[in-house]
Image (cartoon, grey):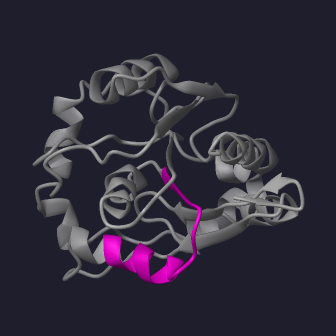
Amino acid sequence: MRQGGRSVATFALIHGGGGTAWDWPLVAPVLRECGHDPVAVDLPCDDESAGWSEYRDTVVRAVGKRGDLAVVGHSLGGFTAPLVCAHLRVELLVLVAAMIPSPGELFADWWTHSGYEASGYDDVFYDDVPPALAAEARRRERNETSKALHEAWPLKVWPDTPTRYLLCRDDRMFPAAWARRHARARLGIEADEIDGGHYISLSRPRELAERLHAYAAAME
């Protein structure tokens, strides 16, 4: 885990609904500066034949034989990240402004089951992202049409992986007060907090990367 006096980790970076590996273009370089190995993944969200197992296997293939693995799931990526933890040896799971599924839960049912409370804003994704970056992110968005959204979440229990939930204080998609309750109710943990909106990977990438680096340092 340590190399040259620094903690080194492989970070599997999992995007949210309709996103791409490009969602992490500003986070990955900072992680590399810190000596880590970031692996951003393109989930098969626009493949109508892809279920949760295909989502998981996409991440597993991207990670390959790398070790000292930390898995980061953003938003809907919270459904995929734990599946990877149940399949590979993972040192740390970090959920960033994420949905936390329950065993057997359908995506469509999560909103009611979780007591989701919308913020009432129109722009819930990119409100604090620089305009040019927001425009590029919108251009790259994909339709989430996979069959995974119609499948029950397959794990029977949450994986036995140390888990951190990082909420964004200015998040319009998953407001902070609701996210605190969500982490307590679903995982029995207190959420960590950071300034920024839902797409913190684009609005405050250095701050996010530094937080992930700090988590890696605590993995020893």
Q: Look at the image and give the residue range highlighted in magenta.
A: 56-73
Q: Quadrant of the N terminus?
A: bottom right
Q: Position of residue 172 (x, y in %)?
A: 52, 32
Q: Residue at x 50, y 61 (%)?
A: 15
Q: Residue at x 56, y 41 (%)?
A: 198
Side of 185 relative to 135 (left or right): left
Q: Is residue 198 magenta?
A: no
Q: How many marks?
A: 0
Q: Is residue 127 above or below residue 85?
A: above
Determine which quarter of the picture holds residue 77. bottom left
Q: Is residue 10 above or below residue 98?
A: below
Q: Is residue 162 above or below residue 151?
A: above
**Residue 64 lies in magenta, yes or no?**
yes
Q: Give coordinates of residue 90: x percent, y percent.
A: 46, 58
Q: Tell me residue 108's x, y (percent).
A: 17, 48
The residue depicted at 44 percent of the width and 20 percent of the height is: 180
Q: Residue shown at 55%/65% (left/top)?
A: 12
On the rendered structure, is 109 left or right of 126?
A: left
> Where residue 147 appears, x then y in whole percent?
17, 71
Give whichever of 180, 45 is nearer the camera: 180
The relative height of residue 207 versus residue 82 in the rendered view (above or below) is above
